[in-house]
Image (spheres, grey):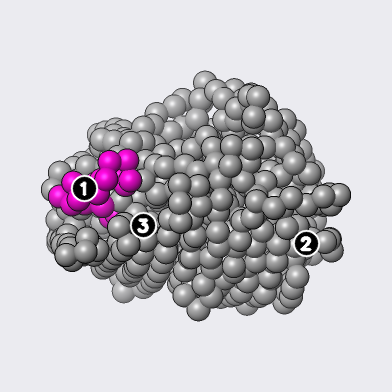
Amino acid sequence: MRVFLLISGFFALTISSCVGQVPIPLVDFQVTQPPPVPQNAQKCTIQLFQRAFGNSFGDPEVVEYTPTTDCGGPGSWTAVTLNFTVTSNGTQFDRLGIFTFQNVEIWRTSTPEPSTTGIIWTYIKDATRFIPLFSDSGRLIFELDNILDSELNGIYSTTLEATFYASSAATPAAAKANVILSISAANNTSSASADASVSPALSVDLTLPRNAIAAYAELYASGNGNEEFWYTNVPNQFLGDFPSNSTLGDGPFREVRLLIDGKVAGTMFPYPVVFTGGILPPAWRPITSYGALDLPTYVLDVTPFLPLLTDGDAHNFTLDVISAESDGAINQNWFVSGKHFFFSFVGLEHVQYWGVRLLQIVTANTSSPTTGNMTVYEANDFPVSSSTASISQSGDMVITVNASRKIHIESDVCSNGVCTTVVFDQSLEYSNVQSYFDGLNVQDVLQLSSGSVSSTHNGIVVLKDDFSFPFALNFTTINSTTFTADFDHSYNRDLRRDLSFIVRRSKKDSVLASDHDRLNFLQPSKIFPAGGFFTGQSTGSTGSGTSNNSFSYRDTAGNTFFRIVDASQNVITTDHTSSSLTSDQERSQSPQEPQVQVKFVGARLPGSRTIGV
């Protein structure tokens, strides 16, 4: 599928009073396409839980799930979606939310910050790939660590529903896995989430099916604490040129690596998701930054490793996060989790999480072990990187960090007398230029992560991911309580992946390739800058703003979704949608008067600083 999203706007915080005006509760949302589900299929909806998260730190919602049979037998569905609706009012920080089902993390989200008169949002997530989990009884855990005190009184009232779409001759059952293994630090007998702290790494030993013939890993990334604004950190060698407590070290570059038995199997340069309490909170109300309600993921083909993994022994899967520093060190904290799919086809701060979201493994229709050889392995342990700086006589400074990564792996993967030549390639580039002026009161960040990921099986493209994530930020400190910020935030992506992967029909069949799922996203870009003021006060910061968003989605099934939506002073002023897809998700707000005074709990800033908190 193809998505284009452009966001712009002007955001201004004021400290003026607004007498006699009561704002109407806001409808918050992330601009995205509805799930591409069949419009005419029979569907059945069940409520999974309803819960108000007040003082919920360490107290997740735990649900014992039983599959419905109202829309066909368990696992026979053509699609599954999750509908998450939340309301809140009062004063509260944005919080990270994690859905774990049968010890497998299936969704990572976050909350918009509430207002005293209330907010509401609904997000509909496509959960079709998790049909194997929904086919069996199991435990669903939702973790939303919220805290209430004398100043933070916002409670998040949540409802989660699942909708199952019945299969038919026109809409056949979705291809699904028959075994899922989780890479995590938790077990399904506890109510804990499936995340483990990194650094240094999450390391798990797993035994794969001996007849596995294809495997794909899906990675995700999000941010927190000293690592929430990692793209604004400076290299350690230049940290001494900054006043104490003004910035953080370990540089702005981050790479997430997946290692198998100590060998780099693939990496990712992540997209910088900005949460609703990050840098300039008015910029993300009522329209959140892209990814805040549903974090993006990244796909790797690890099929070339299968000849080394199908011997019946346990093998090590390790996930870590590194910087461009000589020791690869990063700040705390990062958390990871993951899972394996086996196919048989016939807070006060955001916690930074990195993890394997999905590892899908296709098994052959034979019990014979997969054999073969890895014929080419070209992957260094670390990317090539450089860090330079120039300092003027006036103290102005420009710091440049560059990094690149190339991976090329080839293998012959053989099953039942038939061999498949698998070629996996990655070519990734990164640049970050930070400029400091006016006694370091002005900070400009220009970052670009881009690259191409591809994989072929016997010359057939099963994975193609071309991406570009430009990010620009101007942060200007006016005084100890006031700053201005301008954004240029973009997410450009063209992703094609074969959802059925490779299917062995018999010992003499070779490759069966199905339709591809084509994802292409383009989010906020330089074309539309955003900016504003923030003034923090102990009694609460106030503000207003405008934003302009343009979003476009296409996929190879012919589905389309286009939306242009603008907001001014927390009110939707323009909302035009053209779509072949339908959704129950809220797409607009009721007309209301502009809100010139809206209170915010505060802002989290680069360098692990805060204003108004």
Q: Which residue was labeled with disc 1?
A: 239
Residue type (three-letter) at the residue carrying disc 1: Leu
Closest to the observer, 537 or 529: 537
Residue 389, image x and y in percent?
17, 62
- The part of the chain drawn in magenta is 234-255
Q: Are marks 2 and 1 in contact (CB under 8 Å)?
A: no
Percent position of residue 592, x then y: 83, 61
What residue is shown at x 53% (from left), y 65% (from top)?
531
Location of mark 2 (residue): 594
Please give the count of numbered marks on the rendered protein: 3
Q: Is residue 221 visible?
A: yes
Q: Is residue 406 above or below residue 297?
A: below
Which mark lies nearer to you, 2 or 3? 3
Between disc 2 and disc 1, whose residue precedes? 1
Identified at 76% across, 44% down, the residue is 118
Nearer the observer, 62 or 541: 541
